[in-house]
Image (cartoon, coloured by chain):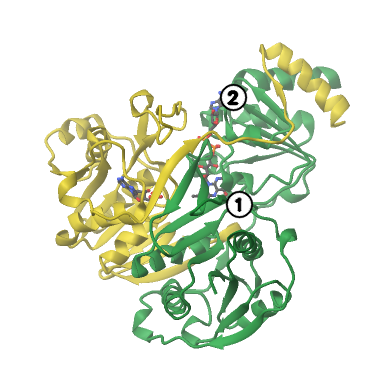
Chain colours: A green, B yellow
Amino acid sequence: MDILVVLEDNRGVLHRMSREAIAGAQKLASNMNLSVGALAIGENADTLANEVANTNMQEVLVVKNELVASYNADGYAETINQVIEQESPKIITVGHTYQTRDYFPRVSAKLDIPFIPDIIGVRLGDDPVFNKQVFNAKLAADLTAEADQVLISFQSAAYSEDEIESGKPLIREISVNLDPSLIRSESEKPFQEEAGEIDLESAEVIVSVGRGIEKEENIPIAFDLAKVIGGEIASSRPVVDSGWLPLFRQIGSSGQNVSPKLYFALGISGAIQHVVGMKGSKNIIAVNKDSDAPIFEIADYAVVGDLLEIIPKLTDALQAEKD
Amino acid sequence: MKIAVLIKQVPGSDSALPLTGDGTWIDDSLITFVMNESDNYALEEALRIREKINDGEVVVVSMGPDRVQRVIREGLAKGADRGIHLEEDGQIETDPLCIAKSFTSVLEDENFDLVLTGLQSDDTGMGQTGILLGELLGMSTATLGIETDIQSDTIRVKRELESGWFQWIKLPLPASVSIQSGINQPRYPSLKGIMGAKKKEIKIVAQSEHRPDTKWQSLNRLFIPQTNKQTETLNGDADTIVNRLVEILRSDLRII
Ligand SMILES: Cc1cc2nc3c(=O)[nH]c(=O)nc-3n(C[C@H](O)[C@H](O)[C@H](O)COP(=O)(O)OP(=O)(O)OC[C@H]3O[C@@H](n4cnc5c(N)ncnc54)[C@H](O)[C@@H]3O)c2cc1C
Ligand SMILES: Nc1ncnc2c1ncn2[C@@H]1O[C@H](COP(=O)(O)O)[C@@H](O)[C@H]1O
């Protein structure tokens, strides 16, 4: 096959972003007249292969080897190296997940082929041009591979799984040759940190603060608004990193996913790792002093101004309405 | 314990980002630069490891034009022992394999026990340089470190997984680990540190001595993303904005 999609096992089920990667690969394939295949690895490989058994692909390769029964970066990278060498795909794709961040660069280093990560789209010409967000989503870039083979990963929601074409792939089990000495790290069992006592997922209104709040002493500005409007407080990562709010308030790829009726984004720039956690909100009011802030691209109401001035005034006005 | 920390100088999050005339990069001369956010955390982690085992050396390494010596000095002022500057002439390289090979050629004779990098650079966001470098140097590697536990010949790393999951892994040294923001609270340089930094060594390596001849990928053009979402923009003075917001909350959204 020409385009290989590596499927990700998300605790026994196919990772949502693997489906999006299939949709992206199919689109690329039909535009470039190429064929698509998928690769399922590990103890759940059959389940994953089954989940894609109705999609339009040439074949699904299945690798079962006890050294990659569960994910480990060295084993995965070597498995994929060998599959690439056996099957010679031109483009190797995945979703841009945390796991991808962990093992795809190893494949790039070992096989000496470029990894163009986190792409949001592809433009076709003589060679495909890959689009990627840069400068924390404030700009986008055109990238091209200077090699015959390329590794790419798709950003969350770059393609929709609703676009997947159906079909009947062949399922083929293949073997790889892995030596135990290759796996240098010992992995313990994944675990979840204690959850917070606040259920942000069921909140109707969320007032979320970002680095634009500037300092810890300003956090009450957000609490005051939340109180008068009956909302919960949340935040972006830097606010949690600085210790101003606890981790369970963090929204985004390493925090919570929320979809309230109203999401206030106060001084949040709109980086993808934050946006994936809140873009399902029914309404987004963003307050940012930078009129080019990427958050405005997904906001329903774009307030250009200083939150430290506007929010206390808004709180007062809402309080006056109530009284 | 010999530790290298890769620190990149990138535009500050408040900086304007004007494009160059040909649109291939940003106009460096109009930008305020800072230390890449996750690299600042990586540096702090290296300093803490050295303090904990009370032995060793922390070397800060940066590639870029002359201006990057400022972040190297900042690292030295916080307590790193010496610096290495891989010079770049003209526009900076954006190809991660090319960058990693430059670092490899300069660092391979140093025999570092540990290389710490940021998780990703805030300009190009490639998220791979630390792993590429580690692999090219034959080190064990890990990403997304949010806690470390150093032993004599191993390092345990708590890795951040998606949606609130974590995992500890143990790696033999030498290792290259990429660090996630929030792992610690980075220090500020002291006045004494700033004064002392002036006397510390920065080794300079010319571009011709580290840059490979090949390229694996190119960044050809930058542009401002287009949006197709219907957005109502509110601007003007604070009172006008607040009046409209109250109206939106009352009539459009029926929140109040
Ligand atoms: C693997 C990985 C996982 C991550 N996980 C998450 C995650 O789960 N959640 C998350 O949020 N991030 C996450 N991040 C970080 C993410 O990439 C961004 O760095 C982060 O979201 C930026 O937060 P911010 O918008 O608050 O800060 P910044 O990007 O610094 O933005 C601050 C904004 O405030 C504005 N501003 C400043 N002052 C004012 C003022 N007075 N009034 C109004 N506006 C003002 C500025 O114009 C700017 O737009 C992750 C990153 C990586 C690489
Ligand atoms: N030019 C550079 N100078 C110093 N460090 C760099 C450079 N490029 C990348 N790095 C390091 O590699 C990490 C990941 O970068 P990237 O792969 O570009 O996202 C950064 O956080 C830095 O620690």
Q: Residue A50 vs residue B123: left or right?
A: right
Foreground residue among B63 and B40: B63
Above or below: residue B17 compared with residue B117? above
B23 vs B247: above or below: below
Pinpoint residue B3: horizontal percent, then vertical percent: 24, 56
Determine which of the numbered discs, if any, sits on residue B238 in the image.
Answer: none
Residue ID for mark 1:
A255
Query: Ligand 1 appears in which quadrant?
Result: top right
* Horizontal and vertical percent position of residue B226: 61, 35
Task: Give the position of the N terminus of chain B as an image quadrant.
Answer: bottom left
Q: Is residue B205 left or right of residue A314?
A: left
**In the image, is the residue at mark 1 within 8 Å of ligand 1 by its beta carbon?**
yes
Dot 1 amino acid type: Gly
Q: From the viewer's perspective, tell me whether residue B123 is left or right of residue A98.
A: left
User: Disc 2 marks which residue?
Assistant: A291
Please tell me how crowded label 1 is: few (under 14), some (14-19), or many (20+) other residues with Cα within 10 Å: many
Q: Nearer the viewer, residue A308 or A63?
A: A63
Tell which of A57 and A11 is nearer to you: A57
Query: Alpha-carbon neighbours of circle 2 within 10 Å: few (<14), some, or many (≥20)?
Result: some
Quick one: SS at disc 1? loop
Tell me the quarter of the picture where residue B27 sits. Answer: top left
Disc 2, SS: loop
Is there one chain holding both mark 2 and mark 1? yes
Q: Position of residue A203 (x, y in %)?
A: 77, 45
Q: Earlier in the sequence, mark 2 or mark 1?
A: 1
Chain of the residue that carries numbered disc 1 in the rendered image? A
Quarter of the view holding residue A20? bottom right
